[in-house]
Image (cartoon, rainbow, N blue to C red):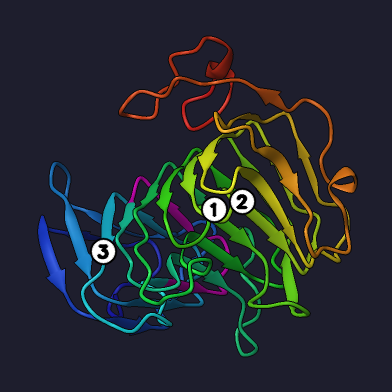
Amino acid sequence: MAAVRAGSSLCLRGGEYLENVSIVPPRGTPTARITMRSFPGERAVLRGLQRITDPDYWTFSDLGFTWNTGTYDQHMVKVTAGTGWIVEYSEFWEAQSFADLLIASSSTYGPPMDWTLRTSYLRDTIGGELNDARSHNLYVNAPGSTGGLIERNVFANAPNGNNLKIAGSSSGTDGTDNVTVRYNTFLNGHQANVVLGNLADNNQFYRNIIVANDRGWAFRLYDLRGASNRVTNNLWWDSGGGVFCSDYASAVLCPAVVGTGQVAHNPLLDTTYHPQSLIAQDYGRFGF
């Protein structure tokens, strides 16, 4: 990664790459992006802890990321700051830590700006501690973020946390700002499918499919003190009689965040997460 230059592509041959990576990579530009991807027709899997800091105008495409070894407080893949980066068509699985993927701000490099996570699969976050609420498929802790986009992904199976957490690290901390979450499929979180918390501002959620979690909460507002967050036009299903939104221990309550258009309906997901219900086909990863 250190040897590439703006406008170049780095193609990884198929197979596993067993290594921990920590790098501030060379910068791309808006007109000369840097691409890192699997070689066409093959699949590269990076097994280890990946730390990518301040990637400007990088595209990470068609890659696999999975756990090798580490401690529970280490995020398997961490992208910090950076402008205009894209993660797409990739898979993250079996982190034994706080998250399969963490997107973060930095006091040195600032917040991530104009970033995108799309068409990817984040699943089976195992966690590595007794606490059953802190290991997530995706964790976005990015105060000051601008232009964040999470779209057309599948988030599946977070037995010790949430599918998606957009918040700070604990009560009283800062939050994540300016993220749009649309056309994703969420299922089998433990605490909730989506947690929105702390001083999170101006985050928008719409056209997602949200299915069953252990506590029956599609959304949980945790210590939410931010403004202009909106949840509209999502399809959700919990056969156990759960509630769409819980605002336990939150300053901002559900009616201030949850707007109109929530549809309670079983999407009848098949094994590839395609909804078989006609009503659900307007929502989620494969929504029209």
Residue closest to the far top:
278
- Closer to the N terminus: mark 3 or mark 1? 3
Which of 84 and 158 lies nearest the eye of the viewer? 158
Is any atom of residue 252 visible in this view? yes
**Which residue is tagged 3?**
66
Foreground tag (2 vs 1): 2
Image x and y of residue 271, in percent: 30, 28
> Which amino acid type is marked by label 3?
Thr
Asked if marks 2 and 3 touch (Cβ < 8 Å), the reply is no
Residue denoted by label 1: 116
Q: How far apart are marks 2 and 1 (CA)?
A: 18 Å
**Is residue 166 rendered magenta in the image?**
no
The residue identified by callout 2 is 194
Q: What residue span does the magenta drawing correspond to?
A: 78-90
Query: In the rendering, at what x and y percent does residue 163 appear?
Result: 51, 52
Q: Which of marks 2 and 1 is nearer the N terminus?
A: 1
**Crowding at label 2, few (<14), some or many (≥20) Cα neighbours within 10 Å?**
many
Location of the N terminus by quadrant is: bottom left
- Element under disc 2: strand
Identify which residue, 260 or 37, lies in the foreground.
260
Q: Which one is closest to the eye, mark 2 or mark 3?
A: 2
